[in-house]
Image (cartoon, rainbow, N blue to C red):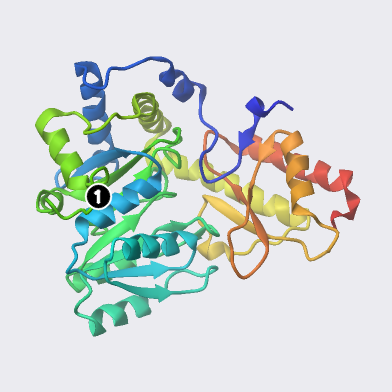
Amino acid sequence: MAHENLTLLTPGPLTTSPLVRKAMERDWGSRDSAFVNLTSELRFMLAGLANGTDTHVAVPIGGPGTSAVEAAIGTLVGPTDRLLVLVNGAYGERVVEIARRLRIPVEIIRGPEDRPIDTDHVEAALRNNPEITHVALVHCETTTGVLNPLEEIACIVERFGRLLILDAMSSFGALPIDVTISPIAALVASSNKCLESVPGVGFVVVERTLIANAASVSPSLSLDLHAQWAAFEATGQWRFTPPVQVVAALVEALHQLKQEGGPPARLNRYQRNMNLLLAGMQKLGFVSLLARAVQAPIIATFLTPSDKTFVFRTFYESLLSRGFLIYPGKTTAVDSFRVGCIGAIDHHVMERFLTAVSEAKMAKKNFF
């Protein structure tokens, strides 16, 4: 099968709709009033999606989601502050690396990759270390697909008077996130996950008063989130050349999200995909890493079969030839691979994928 017909069962980039792809056909002038208006619409919709229109502002920035994470940490956590990072996977570790490269003092709580962050440990850390000013949490840790307890941690952080920076990269747009319910100082996400657009734009939905007071904090020129926000407020324009077609695609994707019924409807679709995937893979002899209670309906991690005749690359290529792309695992303790449930796909696609897995298994009987 030709690669252009692939279905991406990954956590992003992922399968997009024809209308999202079509939105990229037009050229835009980055300083033109039409694009300025498009950017304004994007910012309004992103803040509204977090129910933060009254208290927060959305600040998009060109690049991958990691650029937005680095911009948020580098701008909102000052050199005299101290950041507590909650880690149970590779993306939490990435936040630690970002903070260290920015020379921000870091405290770390590490937990097992297959379990949520322990809220008792968070409470104890904040009680015992008054120097901690900010807490960073990955909502859905796509190393495994484990869902961390956002509401409980947000309430603990607020009770101790600290600020929460949430990496919602793989959850925003599907899982419930409401800054009026879960106190979040800054929410970071990107265009190419549950919003079902293409890569190229990260963004931070941040408290208006917090970003307004963050002038000259960032050590970076291009990742200075305050300077980016100030430019939007003053002129409506991006400081540097924006990915104009990606912005257009993201606005179209946000309209499609609204038409679908918003995050609750999208979550229902993803959950149905996940339920089919887990049940079907179990019937085919695969074992899921996570307990169902902590499995987010974003991406599932499956243990590599213990049979030494199983070769992941052969399995991967077999699925690729049938039109499906999956990801290898990122776990450190066990060998695994990952299958995503997000993107412009539904249960019919998941059923076809399970058929492809069955065919791949039959074509290479010594997998198991």
| Quarter of the image where one finds residue 75 | bottom left
Residue found 46% across the figure and 21% down from its top:
19
Viewer-proximal residue among 222 and 108: 222
Residue of label 1: 220
Residue found 27% across the figure and 31% down from its top:
42
- Residue 292 in percent (x, y) is at 57, 62
Identify the element where label 1 is drawn. Answer: loop
Left or right: residue 190 compared with residue 346: left
Q: Quadrant of the N terminus?
A: top right
Viewer-proximal residue among 141 and 234: 234
Say if residue 177 shows up in the picture. Answer: no
Residue situated furthest bottom in the rendering: 128
- Residue 348 in percent (x, y) is at 65, 35
Say if residue 266 shows up in the picture. Answer: yes
Residue type at numbered disc 1: Ser
Left or right: residue 270 compared with residue 109: right
Residue found 26% across the figure and 78% down from its top:
126
